[in-house]
């Protein structure tokens, strides 16, 4: 092969390598830019979107206590970033790893995960309402992250609460709940998988269950709307707020 051919081939290879490098750099820049703005089907909202949003003194106070004074509220939630890494609520994230057994509400993996504020009407990915800013929605999914924050917050919201619960007795209780004294009995004779489940959930999440009988005068109203069974009665009482929920194995019917 002549020296001229070798030089030409080397020049062509160098040009090709340069072109490929430029393409890769361009793709990398596009990927980084897209990673910061979220998924195209659920884009992060820019800071300008919230420029005219006024926040109450109560909101700012809560933000400072939960997130901290060192974080700029105007940049919080803007773009796919781990916004909570240095937040007050994450200051004890490492302490959780030393607790045995690990409390259910001690999962603070969200502290190092990226998220941003999104428009729920322009988002086909999972999003949830903000617990700090009314009217705002956040999404971990658009940043390619799992949302452990919502799960942790839901567990935390249960801790210390007392729920008024109606217990319905299934036949035998082998699939739901059973008590020899029948539905709405207030005693310690409840058995069955549904009973075990709610009691274990109460222990894990730290809430209290108060066995409650719905007011008897409400039964006639329940019959008008639902039916004659105690299960209908329990669901009806729950729908009106006399109970928080019912424990038993339920069938879905046309009315309930």
Image: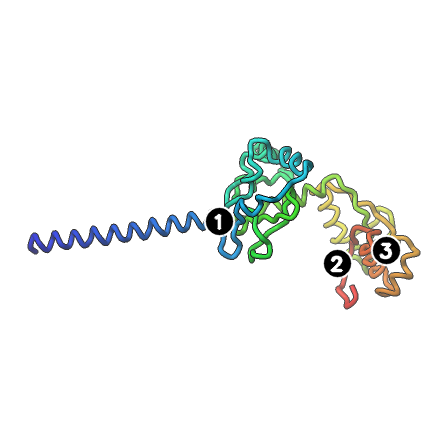
Secondary structure, mark 1, is helix
Spot the residue most to the front. 52
Rendered image quadrant of residue 121: bottom right
Residue 221: image location, x then y, percent: 89, 61
Spatial CA distance of label 3 from label 2 is 15 Å
Quarter of the picture holding the N terminus: bottom left
Left or right? Give the position of 86 relative to 195: left
Q: Residues within 10 Å of mark 1 (few under 14, many from 20)?
A: many
Rendering colour mode: rainbow
Say whether residue 84 is left or right of residue 228: left
Between circles 3 and 2, the one closer to the viewer is 3
- Report the residue marked by disc 3: 183
> Does residue 18 sit above or below 67 in this rendering?
below
- Of the numbered discs 3 and 2, the one sitting upstream in the chain is 2
Kindly identify the residue that appears in the image at 87 percent across and 51 percent down.
213
Q: Residue 87 versus residue 72: which sits nearer the camera?
A: 72
Q: Position of residue 58 (x, y in %)?
A: 69, 37
Mark 2 residue element: loop
Location of the C terminus by quadrant is bottom right
Which residue shows up at 82% across the image and 47% down it?
164
The quarter of the displayed image where residue 71 is located:
top right
List the residue tagged with mark 1. 37
- N-terminal of the pair, mark 3 or mark 1, is 1
| Label 3 to label 1: alpha-carbon separation | 54 Å
- The residue tagged with tag 3: helix, strand or loop? loop
Q: Which is closer to the viewer, label 3 or label 1? A: 1
């Amino acid at each position: 092969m002549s020296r001229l051919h070798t030089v030409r081939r080397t020049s062509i290879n160098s040009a090709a390598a340069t072109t490929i490098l430029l393409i890769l750099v361009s793709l990398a820049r596009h990927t980084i830019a897209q990673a910061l703005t979220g998924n195209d089907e659920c884009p992060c909202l820019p800071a300008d979107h919230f420029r005219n949003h006024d926040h109450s003194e109560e909101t700012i106070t809560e933000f400072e206590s939960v997130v901290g004074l060192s974080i700029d509220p105007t940049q919080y939630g803007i773009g796919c970033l781990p916004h909570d890494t240095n937040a007050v609520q994450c200051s004890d994230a490492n302490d959780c790893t030393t607790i045995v057994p690990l409390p259910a509400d001690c999962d603070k993996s969200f502290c190092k995960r990226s998220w941003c504020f999104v428009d729920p009407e322009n988002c086909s990915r999972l999003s949830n309402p903000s617990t700090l800013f009314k009217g705002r929605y956040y999404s971990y999914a658009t940043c390619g992250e799992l949302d452990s924050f919502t799960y942790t917050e839901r567990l935390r919201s249960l801790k210390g609460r007392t729920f008024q619960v109606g217990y319905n007795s299934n036949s035998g209780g082998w699939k739901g709940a059973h008590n020899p004294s029948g539905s709405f009995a207030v005693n310690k004779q409840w058995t069955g998988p549904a009973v075990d489940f709610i009691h274990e959930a109460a222990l894990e999440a730290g809430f209290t269950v108060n066995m409650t009988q719905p007011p008897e005068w409400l039964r006639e109203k329940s019959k008008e709307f639902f039916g004659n069974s105690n299960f209908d009665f329990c669901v009806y009482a729950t729908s009106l707020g006399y109970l928080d929920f019912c424990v038993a194995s339920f069938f879905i019917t046309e009315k309930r």
